[in-house]
């Protein structure tokens, strides 16, 4: 992470499994999208880390959905800032029935909220880059992961 005074060595960096665990276990996630005029919009969402991507749903007319329709780039963050995972990427919309069924079942298990009858699509954030920040050892553990696009 150039510019932070962090060692160039990869020794002691966080493994991706550390980030994945926090993404899977978070209850609330911060999601940031971009309005049509370039202004940021950040909101809390519920979601699931599945198959290497963040899955969530939102109303088709919500600010998030309208922003993502115009600009699919966004950021999602885990809920605990002292063990933060920040994921930047591009969102795609899925109306795949098999995925919706799987999403609804896992969402019900995690949040006790039935989404099986919702008409809204499932949004999938595919990561391009992610950051792991561990407060207790920021200088030794701050990690950046790069993903294939």
Image (spheres, grey):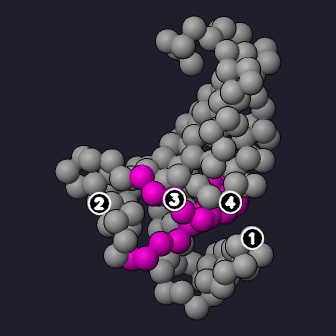
Query: How many circles with numbers are drawn on the protein?
Result: 4
Q: Which residue is mark 2?
A: 70
| Label 1 – label 4 distance at C-alpha | 8 Å
Residue 47 place in picture, x, y as percent: 62, 64
Is residue 58 at least partly visible in the picture? Answer: yes
- Mark number, residue 110: 1
Q: Residue at x 47, y 72 (%)?
A: 58
10 Å crowding of disc 1: few (<14), some (14-19), many (20+): some
Q: Please identify the quadrant where the N terminus is shown.
A: top right
> What label does residue 44 carry, if any?
3
Segment colored magenta: 42-60
| Label located before the other in sequence (1 or 4) | 4
Is residue 54 rendered magenta in the image? yes
Secondary element at image label 2: helix
Specify which label sits upstream in the sequence, 4 or 2.
4
Visible residue check, residue 98: no
Which of the pair 41/149 is nearer the observer?
A: 41
Marks 1 and 3 sit apart, C-alpha to C-alpha, by 16 Å
Badge 1 or badge 2: first in the primary sequence: 2
On screen, residue 134 above or below 97: above
Distance (Cα) linking label 1 and label 2: 30 Å
**At numbered mark 3, what does the secondary structure look like: helix, strand or loop?**
strand
Q: Which residue lies under the disc numbered 4?
A: 27
Decide: few, some or many residues near mark 2? Use Cα within 10 Å; few <14, some 14-19, many ≥20.
few
Asked which secondary structure carries label 4, the reply is loop
**Are circles 1 and 3 on residues that touch, CB within 8 Å?**
no
């Amino acid at each position: 992470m150039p510019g932070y005074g962090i060692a160039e060595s990869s020794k002691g960096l966080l493994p991706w499994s550390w980030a994945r665990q926090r993404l899977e276990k978070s209850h609330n996630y911060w999601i940031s999208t971009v309005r049509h005029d370039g202004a940021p919009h950040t909101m809390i969402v519920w979601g699931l880390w599945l198959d290497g991507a963040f899955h969530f749903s939102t109303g088709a007319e919500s600010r998030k959905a309208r922003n993502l329709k115009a600009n699919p780039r966004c950021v999602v963050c885990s809920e605990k800032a002292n063990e933060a995972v920040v994921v930047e990427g591009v969102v795609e919309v899925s109306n795949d029935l098999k995925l919706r069924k799987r999403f609804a079942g896992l969402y019900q298990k995690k949040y006790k909220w039935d989404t099986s009858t919702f008409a809204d699509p499932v949004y999938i954030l595919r990561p391009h880059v992610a950051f792991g920040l561990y407060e207790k050892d920021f200088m030794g553990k701050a990690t950046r992961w790069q993903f294939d696009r």
